[in-house]
Amino acid sequence: MTKTKLRIFSYEPNPRIFKSTITARICDIPIEVRGAKPKELKNWLWDFDARPMNEDDLKDQKKHIQEAKAGYQGELYKTEAFLSAHPYGTVPAAFSPDGAIGVFESNSIMRAVARLDKSNSGLYGHDPYSASRIDGFLDTALLFARESQVYLLALMADKLNEKVYYDTERALTNWLSGIESALTNNDFICGDALTLADICFCCELLLLQSEYQWSESITEIGGNLLSSTEIEVRFPRSLNHYKKLSERTDFAPDIKNHQAKIKSGQKIYD
């Protein structure tokens, strides 16, 4: 039996975790993902050994009750070991195989998987300079990711307003302007080969497409779907790159399945 190199606990489905599952698939790194829909995680024990709890378990774990934050409401059950490994107490939460070391934030978790690669795939570059260039794109993506998270949480809570919408639109424009420029003379964001920058780009854009579930709320404030109209008109190279990545056999198991759920109109996180 192949030993898991990394365990991830998160709500599911989570396009930001796809960054790690795609990387693991390319590098042939065995990882494990545990989780459930966001509303179900209130009945889970947040721990290296994360698991759903029954009513008796919930009573036994009262000492681990923590006030929910970052998109959750009410109370959650987080062990001391979980909070020690994950000081911010959020998901996605990754762990070393023995549970001793926590890795948080989706880009960092993806990097951890890439660092385990022994196949010389080049996903994280081949030298300090190419790796640092990849880091630059990953760090810039975080600026957009912060706004897109606020945007999607507002949609989920039926609290979208014009400020949130236009802040996200501006962040999307800033982010994609660099991607569009990078793709002018290259097949991939960092040159002629696939890297973590491409994986991150694809997954962040996929997450933004979740807005389709709340298109009426967006129309009500006079907005348009950011993940379609905005990109198709202003950033054609970026959209084409996204489509090509989505069709790759190492991306498709995660990306195409999630795209199908979005297009079907089902409420993914209910």
Image (spheres, grey):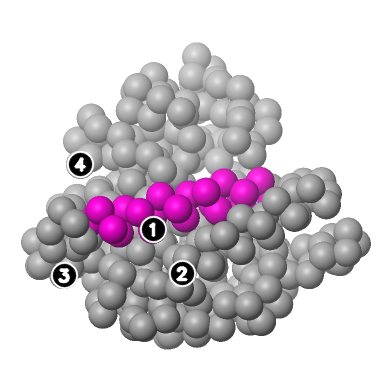
Q: Name the mark nearer the viewer: 3 or 1.
A: 1
Find the distance from the CA under tag 4 to the CA under tag 2: 35 Å
Residue count near mark 3 (Cα–Cα under 10 Å), binned few <14, some 14–19, many ≥20: some
- Check whether the beta carbons of the residues at disc 1 and disc 2 lie within 8 A of each other: yes
Q: Name the mark nearer the viewer: 4 or 2.
A: 2
Find the distance from the CA under tag 3 to the CA under tag 1: 19 Å
Q: Name the mark nearer the viewer: 4 or 1.
A: 1
Name the main secondary structure of what is drawn in magenta: helix
Magenta residues, start to end: 131-151
Residue count near mark 1 (Cα–Cα under 10 Å), binned few <14, some 14–19, many ≥20: many
Q: Which residue is mark 3?
A: 121
Q: Which residue is mark 1?
A: 137
User: Does the magenta portion include 255?
Assistant: no
Q: Is residue 175 above or below residue 59?
A: below
Residue 99 at least partly seen: yes
What is the x, y in percent for residue 195? Answer: 28, 68
What is the x, y in percent for residue 269? Answer: 64, 56
Q: Earlier in the sequence, mark 3 or mark 4?
A: 4
Q: Earlier in the sequence, mark 2 or mark 3?
A: 3
Q: Which residue is mark 4?
A: 97
Q: Earlier in the sequence, mark 3 or mark 1?
A: 3
Q: At label 4, which amino acid type do we have?
A: Pro
Q: Which residue is mark 2?
A: 179
Q: At label 1, which amino acid type do we have?
A: Phe
